Amino acid sequence: MRVAVVGTGSFAKHYINELPVAGHEVVVLTRSHKEFLDDKKWGPVEQRITDYSSVPQLVELLSDCDALVSTISDLSQTYVDVHMALIAACKQTPKCKRFIPSGYGGNAEDFREGPSSLFHHNAVVRDALLAQTELEWTAVCIGWIMDHVVPSGNRIHSDAGPVFPLDLHTRAITIPGSGNDAFTMTSVRDLAKAVAQLLESPEKWRPYTFVQGEETTWLKLAKVMKTTGDMSDLKISFESLDHIRDQKKDSFFAVLTTEVKLFVPSGAFKFDQAKVQRDRAEFFPNVHFRTVTELVETAKKDANAIV
């Protein structure tokens, strides 16, 4: 199966690594040629250059592909415009009829991003996909990116900054709320392995697919970091939800930080475990989903291992 991966960021790199392992051929859609994709470490991978503005051009670029996986990250109208063009193009191709939009967030099935959310564009794209029947599609939900629990040298993703409670540099965790709220975390590499199997599954896709590495809480995560992570001096503090909500929202980043900090306490990153097990058994039964402890142990053994 030839899969078009849209974008060249952190999620895309994991797809570029893992899809060929599962037997898929990867082509990358990108706005400009990326030299790192010419390196043997990554393939080399065929790059198809586009600015996503021309549907006829996209039809030509996607005509020999069997599926499309988007990794575009953009909290603006551009996210919608690009996805709408990709959807329109895939409809006109001979066989590129399986479509995974970017997003990779929490439980979007039960917690729709409202008009005031910075992530509302995700919902707009899903609505467009729901309104059509030519493409089979699914929004993949993964919760928090688990990779952030290991040092930067052990992951492709860059630091999340203050939106992620755990700060490995200061050896501190600032927990929003009580710390007892359950939520999902997933390794991005394990996500890519799951999608590789999902793409070739003969089973009909649902609008939402739940991929989970582990269900945990911030306090449980702190315990793992103190023990397995050799951070016995980890400083644990708590931030009340009222304090988070009352913070000045005088910048885009301030608004983003407030919204993301409330994801876990609101329940938006908690998955229905019956659906998690259903999707795992039906679509990717052969994937081993690693826990926080396993990722931390891998990083401890090899400072250069990319989890």
Image: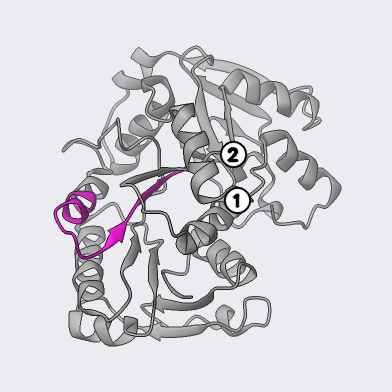
Q: Position of residue 234 (x, y in %)?
A: 71, 23
Q: Amino acid at mark 1?
A: Asp
Q: Which residue is mark 2?
A: 213
Residue at horizontal 58 percent and vertical 85 percent from the top: 38
Judge the density around disc 1: few (<14), some (14-19), many (≥20) Cα neighbours within 10 Å. many
Question: Is 141 included in the stretch rendered in magenta?
Answer: yes
Q: Position of residue 170 (x, y in %)?
A: 66, 33
Check whether the beta carbons of the residues at disc 1 and disc 2 lie within 8 A of each other: yes
Q: Nearer the viewer, residue 202 or 11?
A: 202
Residue at horizontal 44 percent and vertical 29 percent from the top: 271
Q: Nearer the viewer, residue 16 or 247?
A: 16
Q: Which residue is mark 1?
A: 190
Q: Is residue 168 visible?
A: yes
Q: Is residue 157 visible?
A: no
Query: Which stretch is magenta?
Result: 125-143
Residue at horizontal 77 percent and vertical 46 percent from the top: 299
Judge the density around disc 2: few (<14), some (14-19), many (≥20) Cα neighbours within 10 Å. many
Q: Nearer the viewer, residue 252 or 41?
A: 41
Tell me where residue 51 sits by quadrant.
Answer: bottom left
User: How far apart are the two marked residues, 1 and 2, measured between alpha carbons?
Assistant: 8 Å
Q: Residue furthest right?
A: 301
Question: Is 17 included in the stretch rendered in magenta?
Answer: no
Q: Position of residue 235 (x, y in %)?
A: 67, 20
Q: Amino acid at mark 2?
A: Gly
Q: Nearer the viewer, residue 1 or 258?
A: 1
Secondary structure under badge 1?
A: helix
Q: Position of residue 261 (x, y in %)?
A: 41, 29
Secondary structure under badge 2?
A: loop
Q: Which mark is residue 100?
A: none
**Is 157 left, or right, of 258 in this rendering?**
right
